[in-house]
């Protein structure tokens, strides 16, 4: 089946630094990828929808200047947490749609756990 | 507004059957998904329903009633490894997923 790889799985950084998380579709092209964050014991919270070759669509309340999303190719989207603070510590997960299908399952990356000291 | 409701937590016994319910209200509807998520891991796809009725897939079955805005996930012959959170998600008219908070399923021996 379709595979989505996310890197890094774990990252610890100092407050004020920036962290980049990559999401790759390994064996299919994904025109649309989604970025979520998840706090312990809570559900997924959609942060933004990333479309290849265009600007990401951010959900209400998500700072686009803080969470930079780039979807430069059909197999790669990146999320950069800029000037990270301890409250940004969370589990960040990406998912991808297979091709241009509007229905059907999403394929999730393994998630990236960010800890900001 | 758009809303997904599912129980916060359920407990069941190994070998038994459990039904996890989900009700939804969305702007338009393009299907209902169930995902399984173990602690500290990303969700994994279980099922997708867009037509009314029951879809069976091994030990797991999923049911949908569009007129009632209702779905359930049925897990049979429960195993300890089924202990996880089960997320219900409805796809709206913009093909975006609206996620429930998840149901934590605890399996006891």
Image (cartoon, rainbow, N blue to C red):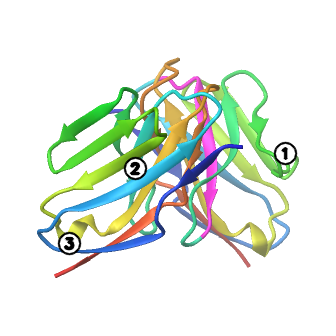
**Residue at the extreme top of the image, as rendered:** A100
- Read off the chain for label 1: A
Provide the residue span drawn in magenta: A29-39
Residue A45 horizontal/vertical position (percent): 64, 54
**Residue at the extreme front of the image, as rendered:** B68
Dominant secondary structure (helix, strand or loop) of the stretch shown in magenta? strand
Q: CA distance from mark 1 to mark 3?
A: 41 Å
Q: CA distance from mark 2 to mark 3?
A: 17 Å
Residue drawn at (81%, 70%) of the image: A85
Residue A11 horizontal/vertical position (percent): 61, 66
Which secondary structure, mark 3? Answer: helix
Q: Residues within 10 Å of mark 2 (few under 14, many from 20)?
A: many
Residue drawn at (54%, 45%) of the image: B24
Which secondary structure, mark 1? Answer: loop
Q: Is residue B21 above or below residue A104?
A: below
Q: Which residue is mark 3?
A: B80
Name the disc covering residue B88, or none: none
Q: Is residue A4 visible?
A: no
Residue drawn at (59%, 32%) of the image: B92
Q: Which residue is mark 1?
A: A64
Q: Nearer the viewer, residue A4 or B55?
A: B55
Name the disc covering residue B35, or none: 2
């Amino acid at each position: 089946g379709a595979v989505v790889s996310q890197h890094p799985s774990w990252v610890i950084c100092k407050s004020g630094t920036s962290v980049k998380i990559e999401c790759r579709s390994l064996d299919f092209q994904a025109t649309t990828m989604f970025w979520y964050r998840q706090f312990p014991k809570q559900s997924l919270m959609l942060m933004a929808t990333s479309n290849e070759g265009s600007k990401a669509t951010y959900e209400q309340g998500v700072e686009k200047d803080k969470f930079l999303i780039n979807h430069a190719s059909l197999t790669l989207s990146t999320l950069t947490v800029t000037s990270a603070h301890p409250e940004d510590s969370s589990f960040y997960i990406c998912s991808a749609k297979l091709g241009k299908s509007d229905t059907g399952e999403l394929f999730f990356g393994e998630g990236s756990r960010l800890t900001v000291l | 507004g758009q809303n997904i409701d599912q129980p916060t937590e359920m407990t069941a016994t190994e070998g038994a059957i459990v039904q996890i319910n989900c009700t939804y209200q969305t702007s338009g509807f393009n299907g209902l998904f169930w995902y399984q998520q173990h602690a500290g891991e990303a969700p994994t796809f279980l099922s997708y329903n867009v037509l009314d009725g029951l879809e069976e897939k091994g030990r797991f079955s999923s049911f949908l009633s569009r007129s009632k805005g209702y779905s359930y996930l049925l897990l049979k012959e429960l195993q300890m490894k089924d202990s996880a959170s089960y997320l219900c998600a409805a796809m709206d008219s913009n093909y975006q997923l609206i996620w429930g908070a998840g149901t934590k399923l605890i399996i006891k021996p």
